[in-house]
Every structure is written in C-alpha cells, then in structure tokens.
Amino acid sequence: MNLAFQDIRHHLGRFVATSVVVGLLFAVVLAMSGIYQGLVDDATVLVHRVNADLWVVQQGTRGPFADPSRLDPSLELRVAAVPGVQSARAFTTQVLQRDRGGRQLRFALVGLSFPEDRGEELDVVQGHAIRQAHGELLADASLGVAIGERLRLGRDEYSVVGLTRQLLASGGDAVVFATGADAQAILADDSSDALIAERERRLARLRDTDLGRSQPALEGLVVDPRWTFPAVAAPPIHAVLVNAAPARLDEVRDTLARWSDVTVWTRAEEERLVLQGMVEKARMQLGVFAAILVITSSLLLAAVLYNLTLEKTHDVAVLKLLGARATRIMALVVEQAWATAILGYAVALALGSQAFPYFPRRVVLTETSVVGVGVLLLVVSTLASVAGVAYAIRVDPGPVLES
Amino acid sequence: MEALRAEGLEKRYGEGETEVWALRGVDLLLQSGKVVALLGPSGAGKSTLIKVLGLVTHADRGDLWMNGERVLEGGRPVADVGELRRSHLGFVFQKANLIPFLNARKNVEVACEIGERYSPGKRAAELLAYLGVGHRADAYPSMLSGGEQQRVAIARALANGPSLILADEPTAALDRDRGRAVMDLLRRVAHEQGTAVVVVTHDHRALDVFDATYEMEDGRLSGPNLAA
C-alpha cells in the first residue's frame, strides 16, 4: 500500500491547492529566469542576425550600440577593397517613436546596404525580403504591423513587405529594416523650422571651433546642406559590417585594425560590448533579483513542505508503534513532497507556456533554466521533507497518541 | 504460557525537588490468554507501566521478558524494538488513533503489511468481521462512531497475532454501553486468540470481564486479585 498516494487521494483538494501555489511560486521563478535570459538574448539578437564577421566602427569607440559611432559612407567602399573581404555593408541604427492612430510605435530603424543586403539572412517568417530600392520595410512581428500595411515615416509612405520574428534591439524594441537610403531619409526628415534651427546650431558649433573663429567666411559653406565638414555635419553611417573569407578573417582584421580612423570588433567582441555596455546593470539587477527570488521561493517551499510533514507527526507516531520501518515512514513523507513538487512544476511550466508569450518583453526559457527549476524543486522538496521526517521520527509516540 | 514477565521496573521523572517516582520496583507476570486490569488513581503510574511494557518509554532499571525472550536489561532495550512491535505487541489507546486518510480496512491492512506475517486483505477482512465492523470496512475514521473506531483499533492491534495487547483506558471516550462492549471484545480476544491483554481502566463497573486486577499507587503495583 502506498501511503503517500492514499493520503493524497484522501486530501486531494489540499494537495492540488498546495501544488498550484507551489506552481505559481515557481512560475515566477521561471519568469524571472526567462526575463533575464530574454534581456540577454534581445541585447545580442541583432548582432547575431546581421551575421557579420567584423564590425568596423569609429576609431576609439565601442559602437554602434554601446557607444555612438560616426563614419563616412565612403568607408564601405574602402573596406570592400581590402583583400579577403567578401562583403562590406553600411549599417545605421536609430530608435524612433512615432504616433500611429493614437498608438505609439517604438522601433529601432536599421538601414541595409541595398542591393547587396536585402535582409534575406534575417529569417523572414512572412512575406519577403526587400526587393525595391525605395519604399519597402521589413518589420519584426512584435511591432504589431501586418504585411502590406503602409507606414508614414518622414515624408514618404513605406510598405511592410516582410515580417521577422523576435528580432529586437537591445532595449527590447522591434527592429525595422529599410534600405540604407530610406533609413537616411527617414532619420533626416526635418521640418523647415528644424532645418533652420539646425543651420543655427551648425553656425554655433562652427563658431566654437578655432577654424570658425579665424575664418568667418566658412559660415556660408556650413549652412549649405551639401557640405559635410566633419565637425558640424550629421554622421551618415554608424558601422560597416564585414564578412571575410574564413581563412583570411584574421588577416582582414589585422589590416583594418591598422587603419587609424576605425576600430574593428569581432562578432563575439561586439556581443560582449552590447552586454557589458548596454544591459550590464539591468542584467545584474535582474540576476540579483532572480537569485533572491530563487532563495525566497525555495525557503517558502521548504517551509510549506516541512509544516505538511509536521502535520503527520501523529500518523508517524502510529506507524512507529505498529513497528513500521524508517524507510516506510520516509516514503510517506518524501513521496508526497515529490508529488507536490512534480505537480507544482507541471503547473509552473503550463502557466509559463501560456502566459509568458503575452509579457511585454520576451521571456526566454532555456533548457538550463527549465531543468534547473525542476531539479531545484526536487532537491528542496527532498531536503525539506527529510528534515521534517527526521524531526517527526524522533518524536516520542506516547504523548502524541495521548494528546 | 508466560507472555510477559517484568522484574524490578523503576522509572523516575524529574530531578531533585521535582522528582516523581512513576514505577518503584514493579514485578509482573502475565500468562497468555488472560485479560488483566490495571487500576489506580490518576498519577499512580499505570500509563507509565503500559508504555514501559510496550517499549514506548525506557525504564531506568529493571528487566523484561516477552515470550521468554529478554527484551529489557537494566531498563535498556536489548532486542529490536521495531521487530517486537511488529510481531509481539499491539496497542489500543483512549483514542483509536486510526490513520485518518485510510479507511477501516486499510488501517488494518497497513499493520499487516508492516508485520509481514499475514495476507493483508484477507486478515483485515477476517478481523473486522470478527470484531463486528466488517460492514464498515470502507468507511474512513471520521465516518465511524467512537465504538466502531475502537473496534477497528483493536482489529489493527490484532493484525499480526501479537502475544500481548496493551490498552490504555480504551473506553474512556465511550459511553457505558459501548465501553462495556469494547471490554467484552478484549476479553473475547484474550480467551479466543490466546493473547495476553493488559487494560488500564478507571471503570470499576466492568471489572467482571477481567481474569485478574492489579492496583497501582505511587508507582507500586499490588496484586493480582483474581476474579471470583
């Protein structure tokens, strides 16, 4: 006769209620673990998906995500000419927030080096990659736009031709891809008043330089929109993405690293820069909170199971007087704790799989976190019930049975 | 046949001014198939003697034999207590102390399983029928009356064919008729199953069921007073 099963069957409502509470508790632990992993994944997913071997950014910066990076568009051609380079793509990115029908659309706009880069490697799950030089967008599905939907960005309307999945910027915002020219046009979309104000700012910045003070005649040139004096002009691109022949990757990197106007990062370095620079504090905060949550939940679970075990002191005393072996008494308590943990785990997983997709930020359940929470539940339930039964088994049955 | 023999059992609680002698040199001899009563006022040491005989509480001094086997020497167990409880001892308390999540049949079956001597299902059915609660086999303890619970408790105590049943005020929570019925059952068990039964009781109205009575006072045992 399995006493744990008999007890569970007789107190089914209490068992289910306890397991559900345990499940809710550990669903929160799973969620926190998933939010942490989601933050890390979101921060690096763009670096992953654009699939560049090297990131060439402004000299001395950790750009383009962790640090502003400003490069002249001509760098793309210079890099492409380096022996061993298979492709060089201009990369721009900027977070935009636009009102659309009363709803705020917040996204990171990334420019693709069309026609070489049409976004075909971005895992388009619906629609197709960019085919036209102007007017087409690839958007992440999390933005809530549909294929064929038209968005007014700047002075033009753009059509959504393809959707990606879970392609987010480090801040968790959806990424929208346009051709490089379109991205520049959208970013440079200024009203007349804004243009006048920009001219004034350019003049002010020029007057702050020694050159401007010594040569006032330059002011006429500065306000000419075609003029791109580096100290006052807007940066055209933020990085150049390089793919090199695998055998020559180190050679290409060494060559580019010798250039005095750029800094070169590998993909792994770029990911580390993003994690360390952009989400480090949030990651640490979430990590510490997740650790506290794990400890608190474990202690709560242990307290619940320990108290459930103490409630069996009377039954344990009876079994002792009947001459039951310690293994049988242990089985009554430990098997029931395991059953509670297993059902609680199932509730946590079921709840997580249903609820996590609706969280505002992505919740990523890794195999490690899913298995880890299961193992944690089993270990805590075992330790708590063993501690409980160790106490109960020492109790003198005489007074217990008289009470 | 000698079911139990105790010699010089002593037990004290507390120290110094709070010291209380619960047992003072208790000698006792019980024969199989006899039912005896332990009488005496509260605090006389009856329950302590039952617990020492049942190996629930250790004595400070004294020796004890069950079925000829020495189980206590100088107050300390010298045999496997678990094994003795499984094969030689049965307990009945004031409260039935049934396991609440098992029905009547399973309460008896679990004792059979622990004893590993009889087939649990068959033995439980036989004992419940023998004690007149066979029709309540599927009822949980909360659904049984006090008298029915005590009958199931007696069936459980008999599950492994013990040589000694120790009953500590088994009728205290029952009304007179049900109490009398339980006492009659214990007598029947002793005489028909050949089990020695020791009953602690305050109920002097049922003394006629016992083969002998012992009196306890201040930890001292006197008797036996044999039934007329």
Image: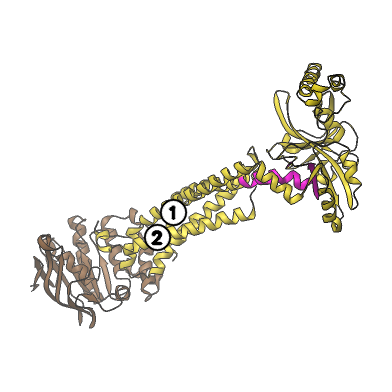
Callout 2: residue from which chain?
Answer: A
**Toward which corner of the image does residue B61 lie, by quadrant?**
bottom left
Whether residues under marks 1 and 2 lie with C-beta atoms below 8 angstroms apart, the answer is: yes
Q: A372 and A232: which one is in front?
A: A232
Q: Tag on residue A302? A: 1
Q: Nearer the viewer, residue B162 or B48?
A: B48
Residue A25 against residue A340 in the figure, above or below: above
What's the image's color scheme?
by chain
Which x, y percent locates residue A197? 77, 18
Which residues are drawn in magenta? Answer: A36-61
Q: Can residue B135 be seen in this snapshot?
A: no
> Picture coordinates of residue A178 (x, y %)?
83, 35
Dot 2 crowding, Cα within 10 Å, few <14, some 14–19, many 20+: some
Q: Amino acid at mark 2?
A: Ala
Tell me where residue B207 sits by quadrant: bottom left
Say yes or no: labels 1 and 2 on the same chain.
yes
Q: For the residues marked 1 and 2, what is the alpha-carbon distance in whole angstroms?
A: 9 Å
As for residue A10 lying within the magenta part, the answer is no
Query: For the residue carrying disc 1, how many other residues have a C-alpha within 10 Å: few (<14), some (14-19), or many (20+)?
Result: many
Q: Is residue B74 left or right of residue B87?
A: left
Residue B17 location (% of width, % of height)? 9, 60
- Residue identifier under label 2: A387
Q: Nearer the viewer, residue A277 or A340?
A: A277
User: Which residue is painted at 29% across and 71% down in the image?
Assistant: B158
Q: What chain is colored brown?
A: B
Q: Position of residue A211 (x, y in %)?
A: 81, 26
Quadrant location, the N terminus of chain A: bottom left
> According to the colouring, which chain is yellow?
A
Q: Is residue A11 left or right of residue A165?
A: left
The answer to whether residue A288 of the structure is visible from this angle is: yes
Three-letter code for the amino acid on which mark 1 is drawn: Ala
